[in-house]
Amino acid sequence: MSFKQAAVLAPVSFFLGVLFICFNVDHRILWGSAGLTSEVVADGFQFYATFFNAPPAIKALLHGMIGIGLIGTFSKLHKWDESAVFFDGSTLVAYVFSIALYLTVTIPSLRTIVTPLAEETKEVQVEALSVLCAGNVIIIVCLLAILLLQAGQEYARRQEARELARVEKEQKDAAASVKKDQ
């Protein structure tokens, strides 16, 4: 594994960890067996209020990891071979889509939940909580796709190296047998 690949995998794994923690709340809100009770909603509000009101260092860490992931993905794309075009290009698309979801769904929903405007009712806050949870699940799927794409790229690279070694060995053996015959 190269440094560039680690610069992609580390932020993706970090965000999956954060989102799996959020999934404890998200699962109850989206698919809870008891339905969307006031207790589940209160738990969701409390959890995401704590998340939103985290110290600036935590927010800086999250945003810095986003930057590291982008830099790692762009640096892997710089090579521009077939593997980079397919695997790293698809990784970039999934990563940018995840960032777009974060910017357009997560942040506005958190603001609606934690610091609602005067005209935003409790129903609007509950709807924002549901949308936030659904957005988190979609981001999880995108990040898992990135992990699968990176694993597929490494597998393809190893298979290609193995096949090239086999062909080279066959050519070397054929050349040696030709020299013996002469």
Image: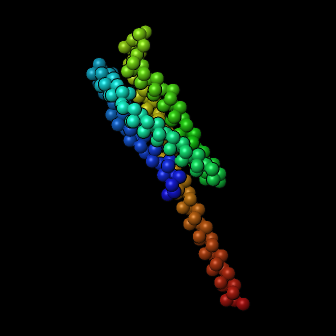
Tell me: residue 130, above or below residue 62: above
Of residue 96 and residue 176, the one placed in the foreground of this image is 96
Instruction: Please give the name of the residue rendered at 45% of the width and 47% of the height, measured from the top-left corner.
Output: 10
Residue 161: percent from left, percent from top:
57, 64
Toward the right, the furthest residue is: 182
Residue situated furthest top in the rendering: 119
Asked if residue 173 lies left or right of residue 106, the reply is: right
Vertical comparison of 55 with 112: above or below: below
Instruction: Residue 31: tell me if it is visible.
Output: no
Height in image: 52 above or below 84?
A: above
For the question of whether residue 15 can be seen, the reply is yes
Residue 23: image location, x then y, percent? 36, 34
Q: Residue at x 61, y 67 (%)?
A: 164
Please tell me which residue lies in front, 164 or 35.
164
Q: Position of residue 114 (x, y in %)?
A: 37, 21
All told, the count of numbered labels is 0
Measured as percent of width and height from the top left, residue 50 is found at 33, 28
Comparing 69 with 54, the one in front is 54
**Observer-nearest residue: 65 or 80?**
65
Which residue is painted at 63% across and 80% down in the image?
173
Rendered image coloring scheme: rainbow
Residue at 72%, 90% (x, y): give it: 182
